[in-house]
Image: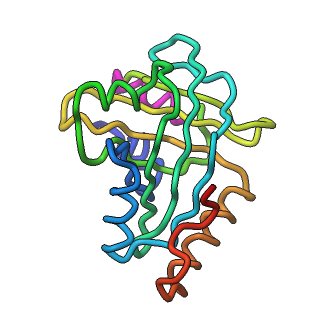
Amino acid sequence: MSDPAASLAALGPIMQLSYCPRDYDAALRYWIGMGAGPFFELHHVQLENVRFRGQPSDIDFSMALGYLGDIQIELIRQHNDAPSMYTEWLAEEREGVQHMCVLVDDIEEARRRVAAIGGTVLQEGELPGGVGAVIYVDTGGGPGTVMEYLQIGQAGRDGFAMMREAHRNWDGTDPIRGRN
């Protein structure tokens, strides 16, 4: 690496570990048992202009977000069989961390840095109303963990801060919030 300031690492710290578990409810119980939580469920997340491996995809998924200390834990459950990195992960019978997330101020700068090292955007989408965007990247080699670069507005950052604060003040009650 000739310029560390231009590296992917310089975009920011990893703030999230994300899992795509075969048994979503068991994974929630596991993480709650580890002291993570409370978890906030977001149902049928609607991203715009979603592409998986360069092709449009109509992914229907939900997620649960909770904190363990200062790291966010995300659990993803896809509801349909649309092509995605989540269905691919499960079809390959993989377990463990599916991706790690870095919040960025400029998604296009993240995209440029990924291209500069020969990385591949596996999946991407835009947040409704143009308030942000996300790219999921395979940087080649390594253990196979995907990197997520997420640009969100202040409301999204405030939401994450609220969840982190809820964890710091959590007494173990009401461990799953927003459950249908």
* Left or right of residue 6: residue 135: right
* Residue name at image x 31 percent, y 31 percent: 90
Q: Where does the image place residue 20, in percent across and percent down from the top left?
A: 37, 42
Q: Is 40 placed above or below 140 here?
A: below
Identity of the residue furthest to the top in this view: 55
Q: Which residues are magenta?
A: 109-119
The C terminus sits in image quarter: bottom right
Front-lying residue, 47 or 112: 47
Residue 56 located within the stretch drawn in magenta:
no
Q: Residue furthest right?
A: 129
Q: Residue furthest front?
A: 180
Where residue 128 appears, x then y in whole percent?
Answer: 75, 36
Residue 52 drawn above or below residue 38:
above
- In the image, taking residue 75 as reference, residue 63 lies left or right, namely right
Q: Is residue 134 above or below residue 75?
A: above
Indicate the quadrant where residue 179 lies: bottom right
Going by the image, does 66 lie left or right of 125? left
Residue 64, percent across and down?
A: 51, 55
Give yes or no for residue 118 being in the magenta stretch: yes
Tell me: 138 left or right of 75.
Answer: left
Q: Residue at x 24, y 26 (%)?
A: 92
Residue at image coords 47%, 42%? 77
